[in-house]
Amino acid sequence: MSEDVLAVTSGPAQGVRDRPDPGPTVLRDCAEAEAYVATVCFKHGPPRLVGAELEWLLDSHRLPDGRPGADALRAALGPHTPVSLDPRSPALPLPGGSTVTVEPGGQVELASPPAASLSDLLATAAADAAVLHDRLAAHGIVALPRAADPALPPVRILDLPRYAAMEEAFDRHGPHGRTGMCSTAAVQVCLDAGEAADLPLRWHALHALGPVLLGAFANSAVVAGRDTGWKSARWRSWQRCDPWRAIPPVFGELDPAAAWARRVLATPVLCIRGAGPRWLAPERLTFARWIAGEGPRPPTTDDLRYHVSTLFPPVRPHGHLEVRYVDMQPGRRWALPVAVLTALTADRAVTEQALAIAEPAADLWLQAARHGLDHPVLARAATAAFELARSRLGGLGAPQWLVDDLDEMTERQVRRGLCPADLPHTPEEPR
């Protein structure tokens, strides 16, 4: 969600199939805007690259309430501090090329460079994550093993126009937006959209797998000291922060690009950027109505690209496809959802199998977030999906530790209808 990494063309497809941007132009027609969205959000070509964005909630025993603030993060991150936290920072990438950003509540995010293989991605992301966590640990800061802060209420530490406007817009719908912004963490997997002929299959498979993998990896039951009754309270918070901005699409749309373009224009504008420290957060102004003349000024293609970055659906097209529905996992197990999704979209035949496995669960988002795999349809689909992914890992050059971790999770959790949220907190966990 960090503004630093929200360029529509960032991620796996970056530098591979992007066309030069002629610069922002004023939009005066919805059909023109929809065509523009379909073009920039779906970059077609062979699915060759994979990337990951890894978020961690943090804890510090050196601070009174355990919450690292801006000063503590600047000291720990040093030259890797993002400009959102220190405008004077060089914001250097980590040794493997991953960039570091900070979320509104102080969560730290690592965004890997696009990799040509799963093994390359895992090696780079794991090495860069180790460097990042070592820097944090040297300042008494450690990553929490959960996808929602189990102890502290949400507090925004970044006072940027984007996040102030986001908070204002989300507050109209209740407290859930602040929780999602400031107290949750995810594993986001970035995959190429693929050839135009294969896009509907990949799009439908990733969405059908959503409830299955949301339930299997649910890891955020406790928020701010309260058991929410949900296995993924992170998912609940994002779905309730804004009903237009985050809900899953209708499953089975024949033309994903056209459907997405219509959705983008029908979604209310979160903010209209300006020169000052506070941006306008209009209420119920859709982008289509802005084009029709209801905003304070005519919108441009640059405004449209920025608007796309303020939508948070389960799968967000950014040129590539950014899968956003998985909770952060404990320790090195962030690699498991990355591997499963990569394996299940490795080629058309496997993707077709994955879609067939997951389709009976395609509409069970609510059940997955609330109950995890304690639902027979989700449990059956998860077991079959994990088995299919496991059968493909050898051909993807997966390291043995990953195969072992996937086998262990499959046997001890998935086959038993359990998810990480069902496992008790261990004494060694922070807080």
Image: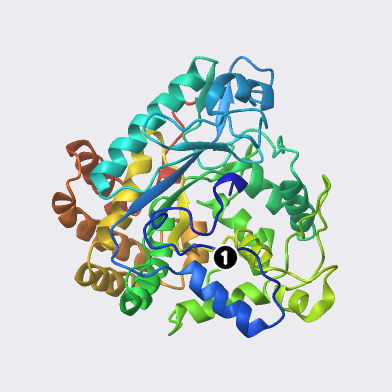
State the quadrant of the C terminus. Answer: top right
Residue position for label 1: 22
Left or right: 97, with 165 as reference point: left
Left or right: 23, with 409 as reference point: right
Q: Which residue is drawn at 72% across and 69% down?
A: 268
Observer-nearest residue: 80 or 178?
A: 80
Q: Residue at x 60, y 76 (%)?
A: 263
The x, y position of residue 127, in whole percent, is 34, 30
Kind of residue at badge 1 = Pro
Above or below residue 226? Residue 50 is below
Observer-nearest residue: 129 or 11?
A: 11
Q: Residue at x 48, y 20 (%)?
A: 135
Observer-nearest residue: 184 or 348?
A: 348
At label 1, counting other C-alpha atoms closer than 10 Å, the crowd grade (few under 14, some 14-19, many 20 or more) is few
The x, y position of residue 428, in whole percent, is 45, 22
Quadrant housing residue 68: top right
The x, y position of residue 139, in whole percent, is 55, 15
